[in-house]
Image (cartoon, rainbow, N blue to C red):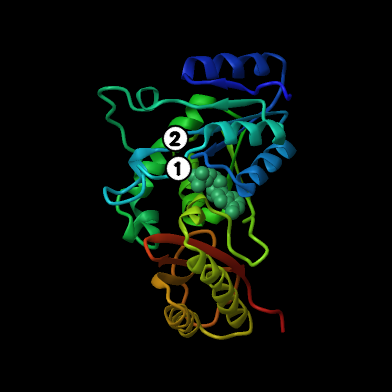
Amino acid sequence: MAASIATVQTVKDLRTEVAKWRKAGETIALVPTMGALHAGHLSLVAVAKSRAKRIVVSIFVNPTQFGPKEDFKRYPRDEAGDLAKLTQAGTHLVYIPDMEEMYPQGFATKVSLPSLTEDLCGAARPNHFEGVATVVTKLLLQCASDVAVFGEKDYQQLLVIKQLVRDLNIPVEIVAAPIVREEDGLALSSRNFYLSPSERTTAPILHQVLSEVATALASGEGCDATSSAGRFKLEGKGFRVDYVAVRDPETLAPLFGPIRGPARVMGAVYLGTTRLIDNVPTAPKSR
Ligand code: AMP
Protein backbone atom coordinates (compact mmCIF):
# COMPACT_ATOMS: atom_id res chain seq x y z
CA MET A 1 0.00 0.00 0.00
CA ALA A 2 1.21 3.54 -0.80
CA ALA A 3 2.31 5.61 2.21
CA SER A 4 -0.51 7.90 3.32
CA ILE A 5 -0.23 11.48 2.13
CA ALA A 6 0.48 14.27 4.63
CA THR A 7 -2.53 16.42 5.50
CA VAL A 8 -2.93 19.52 7.67
CA GLN A 9 -6.09 21.21 8.89
CA THR A 10 -4.85 24.50 10.33
CA VAL A 11 -3.03 27.59 9.06
CA LYS A 12 -0.45 27.07 11.80
CA ASP A 13 0.39 23.52 10.68
CA LEU A 14 0.36 24.53 7.01
CA ARG A 15 2.88 27.30 7.72
CA THR A 16 5.07 24.95 9.79
CA GLU A 17 5.34 22.49 6.86
CA VAL A 18 5.90 25.24 4.28
CA ALA A 19 8.58 26.84 6.51
CA LYS A 20 10.56 23.56 6.52
CA TRP A 21 10.68 23.60 2.71
CA ARG A 22 11.57 27.27 2.62
CA LYS A 23 14.44 26.62 5.02
CA ALA A 24 15.73 23.93 2.66
CA GLY A 25 15.58 26.45 -0.21
CA GLU A 26 12.72 24.64 -1.99
CA THR A 27 10.05 26.34 -4.12
CA ILE A 28 6.37 25.77 -3.41
CA ALA A 29 3.23 25.68 -5.58
CA LEU A 30 -0.37 25.81 -4.36
CA VAL A 31 -3.34 24.29 -6.22
CA PRO A 32 -6.63 25.45 -4.65
CA THR A 33 -9.64 23.13 -5.19
CA MET A 34 -13.05 22.29 -3.81
CA GLY A 35 -12.34 18.55 -3.94
CA ALA A 36 -14.29 15.86 -5.87
CA LEU A 37 -11.11 15.74 -7.90
CA HIS A 38 -10.96 14.73 -11.56
CA ALA A 39 -8.30 14.72 -14.28
CA GLY A 40 -8.71 18.51 -14.73
CA HIS A 41 -7.59 19.13 -11.16
CA LEU A 42 -4.78 16.60 -11.51
CA SER A 43 -3.53 18.42 -14.62
CA LEU A 44 -3.09 21.50 -12.41
CA VAL A 45 -0.95 19.39 -10.07
CA ALA A 46 1.16 18.35 -13.09
CA VAL A 47 1.59 22.01 -14.11
CA ALA A 48 2.47 22.87 -10.51
CA LYS A 49 5.15 20.15 -10.50
CA SER A 50 6.71 21.68 -13.59
CA ARG A 51 6.97 25.00 -11.73
CA ALA A 52 7.97 24.16 -8.16
CA LYS A 53 9.61 21.47 -6.04
CA ARG A 54 6.86 21.10 -3.44
CA ILE A 55 3.13 20.86 -4.16
CA VAL A 56 0.34 21.82 -1.76
CA VAL A 57 -3.28 21.13 -2.77
CA SER A 58 -6.06 22.72 -0.75
CA ILE A 59 -9.53 21.22 -0.49
CA PHE A 60 -12.24 23.50 0.83
CA VAL A 61 -15.84 23.71 -0.35
CA ASN A 62 -16.27 27.43 0.17
CA PRO A 63 -19.84 28.28 1.23
CA THR A 64 -19.55 32.00 0.48
CA GLN A 65 -19.22 31.46 -3.27
CA PHE A 66 -22.53 29.57 -3.49
CA GLY A 67 -25.84 31.43 -3.79
CA PRO A 68 -28.69 30.60 -1.38
CA LYS A 69 -30.38 28.42 -4.01
CA GLU A 70 -27.17 26.82 -5.30
CA ASP A 71 -25.67 23.40 -4.65
CA PHE A 72 -23.42 23.96 -1.60
CA LYS A 73 -25.08 21.20 0.43
CA ARG A 74 -25.12 18.60 -2.34
CA TYR A 75 -21.74 19.57 -3.88
CA PRO A 76 -19.87 16.24 -4.33
CA ARG A 77 -17.41 15.41 -1.54
CA ASP A 78 -14.99 12.46 -1.58
CA GLU A 79 -12.05 13.08 0.73
CA ALA A 80 -10.72 9.50 0.68
CA GLY A 81 -10.87 9.35 -3.13
CA ASP A 82 -9.25 12.79 -3.41
CA LEU A 83 -6.36 11.82 -1.12
CA ALA A 84 -5.74 8.63 -3.13
CA LYS A 85 -5.64 10.61 -6.41
CA LEU A 86 -3.36 13.28 -4.94
CA THR A 87 -0.97 10.64 -3.59
CA GLN A 88 -0.81 9.09 -7.04
CA ALA A 89 -0.23 12.52 -8.63
CA GLY A 90 2.77 13.24 -6.40
CA THR A 91 1.32 15.93 -4.13
CA HIS A 92 3.39 16.62 -1.02
CA LEU A 93 0.79 18.13 1.31
CA VAL A 94 -3.00 18.46 1.35
CA TYR A 95 -4.49 21.36 3.27
CA ILE A 96 -8.08 20.65 4.41
CA PRO A 97 -9.20 23.50 6.66
CA ASP A 98 -12.61 23.31 8.33
CA MET A 99 -15.20 26.09 8.34
CA GLU A 100 -14.06 27.49 11.70
CA GLU A 101 -10.46 27.71 10.49
CA MET A 102 -11.42 29.70 7.37
CA TYR A 103 -14.29 31.77 8.81
CA PRO A 104 -13.88 32.03 12.58
CA GLN A 105 -16.46 33.84 14.66
CA GLY A 106 -16.34 37.55 13.81
CA PHE A 107 -14.84 37.16 10.33
CA ALA A 108 -15.62 40.42 8.52
CA THR A 109 -13.43 41.05 5.45
CA LYS A 110 -14.54 40.80 1.83
CA VAL A 111 -12.46 41.13 -1.32
CA SER A 112 -14.50 42.42 -4.24
CA LEU A 113 -13.67 43.48 -7.79
CA PRO A 114 -16.90 44.98 -9.11
CA SER A 115 -15.60 45.97 -12.55
CA LEU A 116 -14.57 42.41 -13.44
CA THR A 117 -17.47 40.56 -11.86
CA GLU A 118 -20.67 42.41 -12.68
CA ASP A 119 -21.37 40.51 -15.89
CA LEU A 120 -20.91 37.06 -17.45
CA CYS A 121 -21.11 34.57 -14.54
CA GLY A 122 -21.28 37.42 -12.03
CA ALA A 123 -24.64 38.59 -13.39
CA ALA A 124 -26.36 35.25 -12.75
CA ARG A 125 -24.41 34.54 -9.56
CA PRO A 126 -24.36 37.68 -7.40
CA ASN A 127 -21.67 37.52 -4.64
CA HIS A 128 -20.08 34.43 -6.22
CA PHE A 129 -16.84 36.17 -7.19
CA GLU A 130 -16.65 38.07 -3.92
CA GLY A 131 -16.72 34.66 -2.21
CA VAL A 132 -14.06 33.30 -4.58
CA ALA A 133 -11.82 36.38 -4.30
CA THR A 134 -12.00 36.38 -0.51
CA VAL A 135 -11.24 32.68 -0.06
CA VAL A 136 -8.46 32.66 -2.67
CA THR A 137 -6.85 35.72 -1.06
CA LYS A 138 -6.89 33.86 2.25
CA LEU A 139 -5.46 30.65 0.75
CA LEU A 140 -2.66 32.56 -1.02
CA LEU A 141 -1.72 34.39 2.19
CA GLN A 142 -2.02 31.27 4.34
CA CYS A 143 0.26 29.18 2.14
CA ALA A 144 2.58 31.93 0.85
CA SER A 145 3.63 29.75 -2.09
CA ASP A 146 5.81 30.98 -4.97
CA VAL A 147 3.27 29.89 -7.56
CA ALA A 148 -0.47 29.13 -7.57
CA VAL A 149 -2.14 27.26 -10.43
CA PHE A 150 -5.70 27.87 -11.69
CA GLY A 151 -7.61 26.38 -14.63
CA GLU A 152 -8.73 28.30 -17.71
CA LYS A 153 -11.99 26.36 -17.33
CA ASP A 154 -13.09 29.12 -14.94
CA TYR A 155 -11.79 31.90 -17.16
CA GLN A 156 -13.48 34.86 -15.46
CA GLN A 157 -12.30 33.51 -12.09
CA LEU A 158 -8.72 33.27 -13.40
CA LEU A 159 -8.74 36.95 -14.42
CA VAL A 160 -10.29 37.96 -11.10
CA ILE A 161 -7.47 36.16 -9.27
CA LYS A 162 -4.75 37.67 -11.45
CA GLN A 163 -6.21 41.14 -10.81
CA LEU A 164 -6.49 40.77 -7.04
CA VAL A 165 -2.90 39.48 -6.83
CA ARG A 166 -1.75 42.58 -8.77
CA ASP A 167 -3.92 44.99 -6.80
CA LEU A 168 -3.01 43.62 -3.36
CA ASN A 169 0.68 43.00 -4.17
CA ILE A 170 0.45 39.36 -3.10
CA PRO A 171 3.89 37.89 -3.82
CA VAL A 172 2.81 34.86 -5.85
CA GLU A 173 2.89 34.03 -9.56
CA ILE A 174 -0.50 32.97 -10.95
CA VAL A 175 -0.13 30.25 -13.56
CA ALA A 176 -2.99 29.35 -15.94
CA ALA A 177 -3.56 25.73 -16.98
CA PRO A 178 -5.48 24.69 -20.12
CA ILE A 179 -8.92 23.04 -19.99
CA VAL A 180 -8.98 19.23 -19.77
CA ARG A 181 -11.85 17.69 -21.73
CA GLU A 182 -13.59 14.36 -22.17
CA GLU A 183 -13.04 12.71 -25.54
CA ASP A 184 -16.31 14.19 -26.79
CA GLY A 185 -15.16 17.71 -25.87
CA LEU A 186 -17.09 18.22 -22.64
CA ALA A 187 -14.90 20.14 -20.17
CA LEU A 188 -14.31 18.07 -17.03
CA SER A 189 -16.19 19.47 -14.05
CA SER A 190 -17.28 18.19 -10.65
CA ARG A 191 -20.79 19.32 -11.65
CA ASN A 192 -20.86 16.84 -14.57
CA PHE A 193 -21.73 14.25 -11.88
CA TYR A 194 -25.19 15.85 -11.70
CA LEU A 195 -26.04 15.25 -15.38
CA SER A 196 -28.61 12.58 -16.26
CA PRO A 197 -27.57 10.16 -19.04
CA SER A 198 -29.54 12.15 -21.64
CA GLU A 199 -28.16 15.50 -20.40
CA ARG A 200 -24.67 13.98 -20.54
CA THR A 201 -25.26 13.18 -24.23
CA THR A 202 -26.30 16.78 -24.93
CA ALA A 203 -23.59 18.46 -22.81
CA PRO A 204 -20.65 18.27 -25.31
CA ILE A 205 -22.68 20.39 -27.76
CA LEU A 206 -21.72 23.42 -25.63
CA HIS A 207 -18.07 23.02 -26.58
CA GLN A 208 -18.95 22.23 -30.21
CA VAL A 209 -21.00 25.41 -30.54
CA LEU A 210 -18.41 27.64 -28.83
CA SER A 211 -15.78 26.15 -31.20
CA GLU A 212 -18.00 26.93 -34.20
CA VAL A 213 -18.36 30.52 -33.01
CA ALA A 214 -14.56 30.70 -32.61
CA THR A 215 -14.04 29.40 -36.17
CA ALA A 216 -16.55 31.86 -37.64
CA LEU A 217 -14.85 34.74 -35.78
CA ALA A 218 -11.44 33.63 -37.03
CA SER A 219 -12.69 33.78 -40.60
CA GLY A 220 -13.90 37.36 -40.21
CA GLU A 221 -17.54 37.13 -39.13
CA GLY A 222 -18.75 39.62 -36.50
CA CYS A 223 -19.06 39.06 -32.75
CA ASP A 224 -22.79 39.83 -32.50
CA ALA A 225 -23.88 37.62 -35.39
CA THR A 226 -21.73 34.66 -34.36
CA SER A 227 -22.64 34.77 -30.68
CA SER A 228 -26.38 35.14 -31.49
CA ALA A 229 -26.14 32.18 -33.87
CA GLY A 230 -24.40 30.18 -31.12
CA ARG A 231 -27.10 31.02 -28.58
CA PHE A 232 -29.83 30.08 -31.08
CA LYS A 233 -28.19 26.74 -31.83
CA LEU A 234 -27.76 25.87 -28.14
CA GLU A 235 -31.39 26.75 -27.40
CA GLY A 236 -32.44 24.50 -30.27
CA LYS A 237 -30.54 21.62 -28.66
CA GLY A 238 -32.35 22.00 -25.34
CA PHE A 239 -29.96 24.19 -23.33
CA ARG A 240 -31.21 27.15 -21.31
CA VAL A 241 -28.60 29.71 -22.29
CA ASP A 242 -27.29 32.23 -19.78
CA TYR A 243 -24.77 33.81 -22.16
CA VAL A 244 -22.63 33.29 -25.23
CA ALA A 245 -20.13 36.14 -25.36
CA VAL A 246 -17.01 37.20 -27.23
CA ARG A 247 -14.57 38.98 -24.94
CA ASP A 248 -11.11 40.45 -24.78
CA PRO A 249 -8.97 37.67 -23.25
CA GLU A 250 -7.09 40.04 -20.91
CA THR A 251 -9.82 42.44 -19.73
CA LEU A 252 -13.09 40.61 -20.53
CA ALA A 253 -14.28 43.77 -22.31
CA PRO A 254 -17.03 43.01 -24.87
CA LEU A 255 -15.84 42.94 -28.49
CA PHE A 256 -17.86 44.14 -31.50
CA GLY A 257 -17.71 43.47 -35.22
CA PRO A 258 -15.00 41.26 -36.72
CA ILE A 259 -12.20 40.56 -34.23
CA ARG A 260 -8.83 42.21 -34.85
CA GLY A 261 -6.79 40.26 -32.29
CA PRO A 262 -7.09 37.36 -29.83
CA ALA A 263 -10.53 36.83 -28.27
CA ARG A 264 -12.22 34.38 -25.92
CA VAL A 265 -15.58 32.84 -26.72
CA MET A 266 -17.32 32.19 -23.41
CA GLY A 267 -20.56 30.39 -22.65
CA ALA A 268 -22.75 29.46 -19.68
CA VAL A 269 -25.82 27.26 -19.96
CA TYR A 270 -28.16 25.16 -17.87
CA LEU A 271 -29.12 21.57 -18.58
CA GLY A 272 -31.98 20.93 -16.17
CA THR A 273 -30.69 22.46 -12.94
CA THR A 274 -27.01 21.94 -13.76
CA ARG A 275 -25.00 25.01 -14.77
CA LEU A 276 -22.18 24.34 -17.24
CA ILE A 277 -19.52 26.84 -18.33
CA ASP A 278 -16.86 26.62 -21.01
CA ASN A 279 -14.68 28.85 -23.16
CA VAL A 280 -12.38 28.64 -26.18
CA PRO A 281 -9.68 30.95 -27.52
CA THR A 282 -9.75 32.39 -31.02
CA ALA A 283 -7.86 34.88 -33.18
CA PRO A 284 -8.25 36.26 -36.71
CA LYS A 285 -6.81 34.01 -39.41
CA SER A 286 -3.83 35.70 -41.00
CA ARG A 287 -4.79 36.52 -44.57
P1 AMP B 1 -12.92 23.64 -8.40
O1 AMP B 1 -12.59 22.46 -7.55
O2 AMP B 1 -14.06 23.43 -9.32
O3 AMP B 1 -13.01 24.92 -7.59
O4 AMP B 1 -11.67 23.84 -9.35
C1 AMP B 1 -10.37 23.97 -8.84
C2 AMP B 1 -9.44 24.37 -9.95
O5 AMP B 1 -9.47 23.37 -10.98
C3 AMP B 1 -9.84 25.69 -10.62
O6 AMP B 1 -8.65 26.44 -10.88
C4 AMP B 1 -10.50 25.24 -11.89
O7 AMP B 1 -10.41 26.18 -12.94
C5 AMP B 1 -9.67 24.00 -12.22
N1 AMP B 1 -10.40 23.11 -13.13
C6 AMP B 1 -11.64 22.60 -12.97
N2 AMP B 1 -12.00 21.88 -14.04
C7 AMP B 1 -10.96 21.92 -14.92
C8 AMP B 1 -10.71 21.37 -16.22
N3 AMP B 1 -11.63 20.63 -16.85
N4 AMP B 1 -9.53 21.64 -16.81
C9 AMP B 1 -8.59 22.40 -16.17
N5 AMP B 1 -8.76 22.95 -14.95
C10 AMP B 1 -9.93 22.71 -14.33
Q: Which residue is mark 2?
A: 137
Residue 47: x and y in percent read: 69, 43
Taking 9 as reference, is 226 above or below it? below
Tell me where residue 242 appears, x and y as whole percent.
Answer: 38, 68
**Which residue is more in the foreground, 264 or 183?**
183
Which residue appears at 66% of the width and 39% of the height?
Answer: 45
Marks 2,1: beta carbons within 8 A: yes
Find out if the beta carbon at label 1 lies less than 8 Å from the nearest ligand 1 atom.
no
Q: Residue at x 62, y 79 (%)?
A: 215
Residue 243 position by quadrant:
bottom left
Question: Which residue is denoted by mark 1 in the rendering?
Answer: 164
Please name the amino acid that badge 1 sits on: Leu
Q: Secondary structure at mark 2?
A: helix
Amino acid identity at mark 2: Thr
Q: Is residue 264 visible?
A: no
**How much space separates mark 2 and mark 1, taking CA atoms?**
8 Å
Q: Which mark is residue 113?
A: none
- Is 170 drawn above or below residue 160 in the view shown? above
The disc, 2 or 1, on the residue closer to the chain's N-terminal end is 2
- Please tell me whether mark 1 sits on a helix, a strand or a loop: helix
Q: Position of residue 259 (x, y in %)?
A: 56, 77
Q: Label 1 crowding class (10 Å Cα cut-off): few <14, some 14-19, many 20+?
A: some
Q: In x, y percent, where is residue 208?
A: 59, 74
Callout 2: 10 Å neighbours few (<14), some, many (20+)? Answer: some
Q: In this image, 223 relative to 7: left or right?
A: left
Between marks 2 and 1 in the image, the one whose residue lies nearer the viewer: 2
